[in-house]
Image (spheres, rainbow, N blue to C red):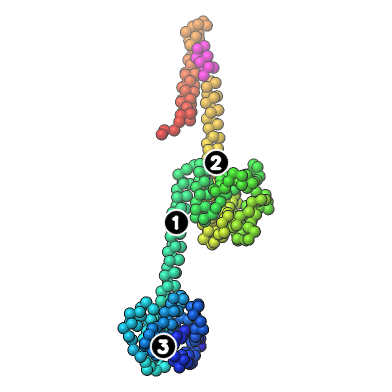
Amino acid sequence: MTGPQILILADTSEAEAMLRNTVDSAGYICIIPEQYSDPSDGDIILVDVTHLRGDPLASLQTQRHLGQGAPAILIAPRLTTEMSEVLFALKIRGFIRKPFTTLDLLEQIEALIAHILSEQDQTNLRVELEASRQSLSRRIGELKALSRIGQAIVSTTDLSVSLTRIAEAAAFLTRADQVVIYLWDKQERALLVQTSHGIEPAVLNALAIPSKETDAFQALSTGQKIVREPGESGHEVVAGYRVFAALTVPVIVNRQVQGVIAAYNQSKRSFDADDQAVLSSLADYTAIALDKAWLIEDAQRRLDESLIAPRNIRLHAETLLDPVDGIEAQVDTLLSGGFGPLTEAQHTAVTHIKQAADRLTEITGFIREELARFDDPPPA
């Protein structure tokens, strides 16, 4: 078996040889310092003191000054006052009184190894907990940002405002230097920039209409995200414009790709799996904003079309007013004898005509009043 590396510091060659044999026979790796210009390797230090006069812990102090920080076990005939004063400062975690047995030594080494492993487990746990805390904190930030995006989409009918908020959130959440949102223009039959974040106008002009060879157009064509890992020469987004890393995600509305979101990094940082998930979520929000805008546009178009018929009816109704007025005037003249006396049958017939004309006038006025409501602004 193999085990921790054990550094041996002894003030006599006999003690050093004995400790070396014990350590080797137990299967541990034994290290004897050859020089004191650099710290020696070792996970545990065995310090054997035979001579208590002078500075018995000088060799350990030297290792500490050089930067060797492994815990130590002190082996000595007794623990002097001077030794006791520096136990903690020199990281001495165990003491074995001479004379001792091999079992005494191995038990001390085993106990110290268990303590070291326990401390390492705690350190690893702290690291894992801190990583979890940071991940959770980032996730909370993402959820808050996505919630704000959802509120912005619900509260506004202006597509450009929604897209601007989405681009800002994409840059913040993925820590991207630049973000561009492209939408497919059916009339132009081209992929056009709708909004951007962090891109200078000169660069934006170069990105305005991407060619079919670009990642943006490829994502539009395939409906798949494209991740460009960092490279020494960078990634060419368009001719003359390079970035360190790029992430391009399609925007899918009703199973059709209608645009893409592209995030770029000029700094030497790649887009990890979390960044990809966040940008995909923002692409979904973009799809929701597009769908809402198109529904509003379609509803407005249908409303405009529905108003055409009432307007035509009103127009035709208004054209009846003058003829009906003329009929009523002629009827009044006939009934008053202006064109000569009428027989009883003629008078009855003309009276029916007058009644019909009066009713037609009422109906025309009713139509005008009802259709006038379409011209009034809605109540505040």
Disc number placed over residue 298 in the picture, else none: 2
The correct choice, above or below, for 283 with respect to 344 in the image is below
Asked if one can make out residue 252 in the rendered structure from this viewpoint, the answer is: no
Whole-percent x and y of residue 275? 53, 58
The amino acid type found where label 3 is placed reads Asp
Nearest to the eye among marks 1 and 3: give it. Answer: 3
Q: CA distance from mark 1 to mark 3?
A: 56 Å
The correct choice, above or below, for 369 with respect to 283 in the image is above
The answer to whether residue 378 is magenta is no
Sooner in the amino-acid sequence: mark 1 or mark 3 = 3
Residue name at image x 48 percent, y 20 percent: 361
Seen from the viewer's position, the closer of residues 192 and 98 is 98
Sooner in the amino-acid sequence: mark 2 or mark 1 = 1
Badge 2: residue crowd in 10 Å (few <14, some 14–19, many ≥20): few
Whole-percent x and y of residue 211? 67, 49
Nearest to the eye among marks 3 and 2: give it. Answer: 3
The region drawn magenta spans 321-331
The amino acid type found where label 2 is placed reads Asp
Whole-percent x and y of residue 13? 46, 91
Q: Quadrant of the C terminus?
A: top left
Seen from the viewer's position, the closer of residues 308 and 35 is 35
Q: CA distance from mark 2 to mark 1?
A: 35 Å
Disc number placed over residue 196 in the picture, else none: none
Helix, strand, or loop for circle 1? helix
Residue name at image x 51 percent, y 84 percent: 34
The amino acid type found where label 1 is placed reads Gly
Badge 1: residue crowd in 10 Å (few <14, some 14–19, many ≥20): some
For label 3, the residue is 48
Helix, strand, or loop for circle 3? strand
- Determine the main secondary structure of the stretch shown in magenta: helix
For label 1, the residue is 141
